[in-house]
């Protein structure tokens, strides 16, 4: 089973590219972030025509997360439930059972700048995600927590650590928050199979960053140990960042045995 995460940076703008990519990607489950549309506007029928069921948690102009699956899609939940959300109404979390695996798709807040109230709330949001996992899931079950985390876990996950000093995405507090998620019972699936630096998932549109190799790895797939045992491949599709009107993120996929 192939499970993919992709921040498409507006599904309305990127739908033709996403449809074309799905035709050749062999993705069984794809989790999308930044759909930037309402639930009513979500192109359910377009994905059905490609063989995918879908669930969408949308806000409208910003954010929005979705899960597409051709291996079944049940037990859908949205948001933190009874837990207080510091970004209430932002539509940043959706989960579902897909092919016997609990798939949790997240779009972590950006944080904007350090210090700021947005950065503080980002840290609270990540703490709330850990609390939600503790209340609703088990590290013993097959689970994949994936999406745009807006945090680069290590210095090797950014093109130049010196360039990011004092900025969000690389602070000790943000990285500690990811470490707390892993401590719950998760491993970084990509890093389990790829140890090299210079492997990025996001390149800013400005300044020719993509062509200059100035990227960061912030799109992550965290898996529980039982999924790690089934892991056979993990890769990012850098080619999807090329061409006309691409997203500024590349899709990242893992393959697991059934």
Image (spheres, rainbow, N blue to C red):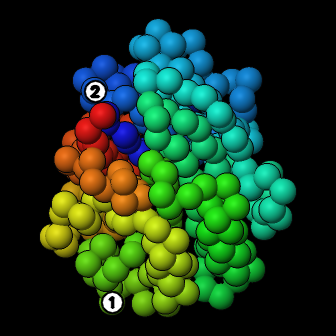
Specify the quadrant of the image occupied by residue 99.
Answer: top left
- The residue at 34%/80% (across/down) is 154
**Helix, strand or loop for disc 1:** helix
Q: Position of residue 151 (x, y in %)?
A: 47, 71
Q: Position of residue 75 (x, y in %)?
A: 65, 34
Please say if 166 is above or below 146: below
Between residue 83 and residue 201, name the one nearer to us: 83
The tag on residue 126 is none
Cα separation between marks 2 and 1: 38 Å
Specify the quadrant of the image occupied by residue 110.
Answer: bottom right
| Direction top: furthest residue | 49
- The residue at 65%/88% (across/down) is 115
Q: Is label 2 in contact with label 1 (beta carbons under 8 Å)?
A: no
**Helix, strand or loop for disc 2:** loop
Position of 96 with respect to 222 (left or right) is right
| Direction left: furthest residue | 196
Q: Position of residue 153 (x, y in %)?
A: 39, 75
Q: Is residue 67 visible?
A: yes
Which residue is under mark 2? Answer: 26
Q: Nearer the viewer, mark 2 or mark 1?
A: 2
The tag on residue 162 is 1
- The residue at 71%/44% (across/down) is 78
**Which one is earlier in the sequence, the residue at label 2 or at label 1?**
2
Q: Position of residue 34 (x, y in %)?
A: 57, 45
Q: Is residue 207 visible?
A: no
| Direction front: furthest residue | 140
Q: In the rendered view of the protein, which quadrant contains the C terminus?
A: top left
Label 1 packing within 10 angstroms: few (<14), some (14-19), many (20+): few
């Amino acid at each position: 089973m192939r499970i993919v995460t992709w921040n498409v940076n507006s599904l309305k703008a990127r739908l033709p590219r996403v449809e074309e990519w799905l035709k050749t990607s062999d993705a069984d489950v794809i989790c999308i972030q930044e759909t930037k549309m309402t639930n009513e506007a979500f192109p359910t029928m377009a994905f059905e025509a490609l063989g995918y069921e879908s669930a969408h948690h949308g806000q409208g102009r910003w954010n929005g997360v979705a899960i597409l699956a051709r291996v079944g899609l049940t037990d859908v939940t949205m948001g933190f439930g009874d837990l207080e959300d510091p970004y209430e109404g932002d539509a940043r979390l959706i989960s579902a059972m897909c092919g016997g695996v609990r798939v949790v798709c997240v779009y972590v807040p950006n944080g904007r700048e350090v210090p700021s109230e947005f950065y503080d709330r980002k840290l609270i949001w990540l703490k709330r995600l850990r609390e939600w996992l503790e209340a609703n899931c088990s590290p013993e079950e097959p689970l994949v927590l994936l999406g745009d985390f807006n945090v680069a876990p290590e210095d090797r996950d950014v093109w130049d650590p010196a360039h990011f000093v004092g900025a969000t995405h690389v602070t000790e507090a943000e990285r500690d928050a990811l470490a707390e998620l892993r401590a719950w019972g998760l491993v970084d699936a990509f890093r389990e199979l790829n140890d090299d630096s210079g492997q990025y998932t996001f390149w800013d549109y400005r300044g020719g960053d993509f062509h200059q190799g100035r990227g960061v790895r912030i799109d992550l797939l965290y898996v529980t140990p039982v999924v790690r045992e089934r892991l056979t491949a993990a890769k990012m599709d850098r080619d999807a960042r090329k061409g006309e009107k691409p997203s500024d993120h590349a899709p990242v996929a893992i393959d697991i045995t059934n």
